[in-house]
Image (spheres, rainbow, N blue to C red):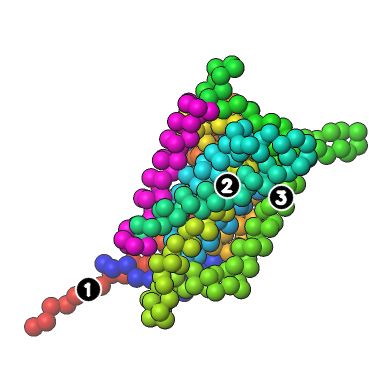
C-alpha cells in the first residue's frame, strides 16, 4: 500500500465548502451528544442562521480575522507555517498599552495627541509583531529547524511576558483587579452607531480599523503580485530549489516572509486592545480571543487566495457570533465556538488529504 498524489485533485473551492458543511454537522452531533440531548440541532441551526444575519455584531471580529488571515497567507504562500499569530498579536497589544498608558506620547493633549498615539501604537505593533516573527524565522533560515513548534512556543513566551507586566509594573492598583488600567477613551477605535426609523443600533464596526484592513489587503495584493519579494515568496512555496539554483538568498526570503507576516498580524494586537478590550487582563492565555489560531482556519478556508480571505473571515466571525447566541440561549458555554472551529479544521484537514492524495495498493509478484 502506497500513498500517491492525485493527478487531478478536486476543484479548489470544493474542499472549503464541504469542510464547512460537514464540520458544522459534526459540531451539531458533538454538542447534542455531550449535552445528553439538551442542545437540540434546531437551536444550533437557528443560532448559526442568526450569526450570519447579524453583520453589525460580527464586524470587529470579521475585520481582525481578515487581517490575521492576510498576514498568515503571506507566509503560507512561501510554505512557511506561521503558527505564532497569538504571540505576534500580544506583542502588538503589549506595545499598544505601553504607548497609551506609560509613554511620553500619552501626555499629549487634544486631537493631535489622540492621532499621534494611534499612529504610534500601530507602527510599533507592526514592528514588534514583525520582530517576534523574525526571531522564529532565524532557526528555520539558518538551522533548517521546523518553524511550526518554534512559532508555537513563541506564543507562550509572549503570553508569559505580558502576564509578568500585567501582574507587576502595569498592575491596576485602584480596584485591585489583575489587569492593566483601562486605556483612555481618546485612544480607542470608535465603533459606529446606526440610526434608522427612530431606532439606534449599536455596531462593532470601526471605520478606522476598516480602512486599515483595506490598506493591508491592497499592500498584500501589491506585494504578492507586483514585487520581486512577493514572487520569491511564492516560488519558495512551490520550488525552493529553483531559488537556490538561481543564486537567490533563500535564507533572506524565509526571514522576510515570516517577518512581513508577523508585522501584519501585530496590527491585530493594537486593534484588539483599542477596539475591544481596552485593557489586558491576567492571565492573558485564558482571556485571549484566540484570533491567532482561528486565523489559520481563515487562511486555509480561503485556499490561500487573497480574494477569498474576507469570505472565510465572515464565515468564521459568524460562527463566533453563533456561539455567543447559543450561550445566550443557555445552550452552551464559551467552548461552543471551539467545537465549531475544531470540527471544521479537522474536517478540512481530512478532506484536503483525500483531495490531494489517494491510497494505491501494489501487489508484488515473486519472480521464478
- Which segment is the magenta one? 141-170
Spatial separation of the CA atoms under disc 2 and disc 1? 58 Å
Query: Mark 1 or 3 closer to N-term?
Result: 3
Of residues 188 and 354, which is closer to you in this image? 188
Spatial separation of the CA atoms under disc 3 and disc 2? 17 Å
Residue 348 rendering spot, x and y as whole percentages: 48, 55
Q: Which mark is residue 363?
A: 1
Spatial separation of the CA atoms under disc 1 and disc 3? 58 Å
Residue tagged by mark 2? 125
Q: Residue furthest bottom?
A: 368
Check the image and report above or below for 259 versus 116. Answer: below
- Whether 155 is among the magenta residues is yes
Q: Is residue 118 left or right of residue 93?
A: right
Q: Are marks 3 and 2 in contact (CB under 8 Å)?
A: no
Of residues 43 and 4, which is closer to you in this image? 4
Say what secondary structure mark 1 lies in.
loop
Amino acid at each position: 500500500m502506497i500513498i500517491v498524489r492525485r493527478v487531478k485533485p478536486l476543484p479548489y473551492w470544493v474542499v472549503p465548502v464541504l469542510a464547512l458543511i460537514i464540520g458544522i454537522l459534526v459540531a451539531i452531533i458533538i454538542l447534542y451528544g455531550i449535552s445528553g440531548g439538551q442542545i437540540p440541532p434546531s437551536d444550533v441551526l437557528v443560532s448559526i442562521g442568526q450569526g450570519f444575519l447579524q453583520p453589525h455584531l460580527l464586524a470587529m471580529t470579521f475585520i481582525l480575522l481578515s487581517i490575521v488571515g492576510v498576514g498568515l497567507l503571506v507566509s503560507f504562500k512561501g510554505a512557511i507555517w506561521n503558527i505564532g499569530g497569538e504571540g505576534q498579536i500580544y506583542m502588538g497589544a503589549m506595545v499598544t498599552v505601553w504607548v497609551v498608558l506609560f509613554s511620553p506620547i500619552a501626555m499629549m493633549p487634544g486631537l493631535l495627541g489622540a492621532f499621534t498615539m494611534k499612529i504610534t501604537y500601530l507602527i510599533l505593533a507592526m514592528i514588534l509583531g514583525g520582530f517576534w516573527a523574525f526571531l522564529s524565522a532565524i532557526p528555520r533560515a539558518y538551522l533548517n529547524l521546523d518553524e511550526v513548534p518554534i512559532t508555537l512556543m513563541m506564543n507562550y513566551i509572549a503570553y508569559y511576558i505580558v502576564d509578568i507586566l500585567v501582574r507587576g509594573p502595569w498592575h491596576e492598583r485602584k480596584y485591585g483587579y489583575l489587569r492593566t488600567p483601562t486605556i483612555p477613551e481618546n485612544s480607542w477605535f470608535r465603533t459606529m452607531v446606526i440610526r434608522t426609523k427612530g431606532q439606534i443600533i449599536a455596531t462593532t464596526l470601526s471605520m478606522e480599523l476598516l480602512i486599515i484592513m483595506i490598506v493591508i489587503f491592497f499592500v498584500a495584493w501589491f506585494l504578492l503580485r507586483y514585487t520581486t519579494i512577493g514572487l520569491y515568496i511564492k516560488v519558495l512555496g512551490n520550488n525552493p530549489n529553483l531559488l537556490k539554483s538561481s543564486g537567490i538568498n533563500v535564507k533572506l526570503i524565509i526571514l522576510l516572509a515570516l517577518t512581513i507576516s508577523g508585522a501584519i498580524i501585530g496590527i491585530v494586537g493594537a486593534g484588539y486592545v483599542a477596539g475591544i478590550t481596552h485593557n489586558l487582563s491576567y492571565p492573558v492565555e485564558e482571556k485571549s480571543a484566540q484570533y491567532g489560531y482561528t486565523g489559520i482556519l481563515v487562511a486555509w478556508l480561503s485556499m490561500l487566495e487573497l480574494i477569498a480571505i474576507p469570505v472565510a473571515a465572515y464565515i468564521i466571525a459568524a460562527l463566533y457570533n453563533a456561539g455567543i447566541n447559543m450561550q445566550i440561549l443557555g445552550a452552551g458555554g464559551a467552548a461552543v465556538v471551539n467545537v465549531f472551529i475544531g470540527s471544521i479544521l479537522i474536517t478540512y484537514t481530512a478532506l484536503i488529504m483525500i483531495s490531494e492524495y489517494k491510497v494505491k495498493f501494489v501487489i508484488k509478484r515473486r519472480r521464478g
